């Protein structure tokens, strides 16, 4: 009978330092509050417009192609303007005496100048439009990257918070069991006296 009274509790709980356990519980509780606030403060709102990397890549490729075409047109326009400035002062061919600015080939190039300038302006406007769309896509990509990062951080913090709550429950149960063992020891001690 003496044996049964003193052996119905966990002997490991007898050697616990109650103050250290209570201090650890307070620390874990404070940590839980901090983690919960962190979870609630993280903004993981999915952007309203979807991001498609293929579309973004196509826009970048279109910009490069348009800029290349624009540069080719600019060179043609510069060539014609140089031709006008060179032969526009009435330089004549030394063989036939024809004013070079009036030559059929030169006239055809000069006549195409306004068409080339209009095409240059159209391509410049398209490049501007594509660059604006590229900025939109860059911002959308940044928004999605931030969303994905925040979502992962929020999940990590949520798991840490839940793990912390489980640890807190274990510590509180340990304290409760410790107090029950202490009560049994006091009761057994009174019964023994």
Image (cartoon, rainbow, N blue to C red):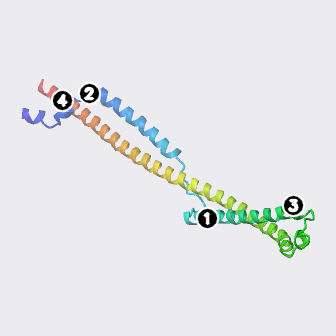
In this rendering, which labeled residue sits more in front, label 2 or label 1?
1
Q: Residues within 10 Å of mark 2 (few under 14, many from 20)?
A: few
Q: Is residue 178 left or right of residue 59?
A: left
Q: Is residue 71 left or right of residue 39?
A: right
Whether tag 2 and tag 1 are in contact, CB under 8 A, the answer is: no
Dot 4 or dot 3, earlier in sequence: 3
Residue 46 percent across, percent down from the top left: 55, 57
Q: Residues within 10 Å of mark 4 (few under 14, many from 20)?
A: some
Q: For the residue labelled by badge 3, is the local secondary structure a helix, a strand or a loop? A: helix
Which mark is on residue 185? 4
Of 170 and 61, nearer the camera is 61
In this rendering, which labeled residue sits more in front, label 4 or label 2?
2
Spatial separation of the CA atoms under disc 3 and disc 2: 98 Å
Residue 93 percent across, percent down from the top left: 88, 69
Q: Residues within 10 Å of mark 3 (few under 14, many from 20)?
A: few
Residue 27 percent across, percent down from the top left: 38, 32
Please give the name of the residue rendered at 24% of the width and 30% of the height, measured from the top-left corner.
16
Q: For the residue labelled by badge 1, is the local secondary structure a helix, a strand or a loop? A: helix
Spatial separation of the CA atoms under disc 4 and disc 3: 112 Å
Q: Which residue is mark 3?
A: 85
Q: Which residue is mark 2?
A: 17
């Amino acid at each position: 009978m003496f044996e049964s009274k003193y052996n119905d509790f966990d002997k490991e709980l007898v050697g616990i330092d109650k103050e250290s356990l209570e201090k650890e519980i307070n620390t874990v509780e404070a940590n839980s509050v901090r983690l919960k606030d962190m979870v609630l403060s993280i903004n993981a709102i999915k952007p309203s417009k979807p991001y498609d990397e293929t579309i973004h890549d196509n826009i970048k490729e279109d910009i490069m192609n348009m800029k290349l075409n624009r540069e080719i047109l600019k060179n043609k326009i510069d060539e014609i303007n140089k031709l006008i400035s060179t032969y526009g002062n009435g330089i004549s061919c030394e063989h036939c005496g024809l004013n070079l600015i009036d030559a059929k080939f030169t006239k055809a190039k000069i006549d195409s100048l306004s068409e080339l300038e209009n095409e240059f302006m159209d391509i410049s406007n398209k490049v501007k439009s594509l660059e604006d769309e590229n900025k939109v896509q860059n911002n959308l990509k940044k928004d999605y990257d931030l969303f994905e990062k925040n979502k992962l951080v929020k999940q990590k913090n949520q798991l840490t918070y839940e793990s912390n709550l489980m640890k807190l429950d274990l510590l509180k149960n340990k304290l409760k069991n410790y107090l029950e063992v202490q009560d049994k020891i006091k009761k057994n001690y009174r019964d023994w006296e």
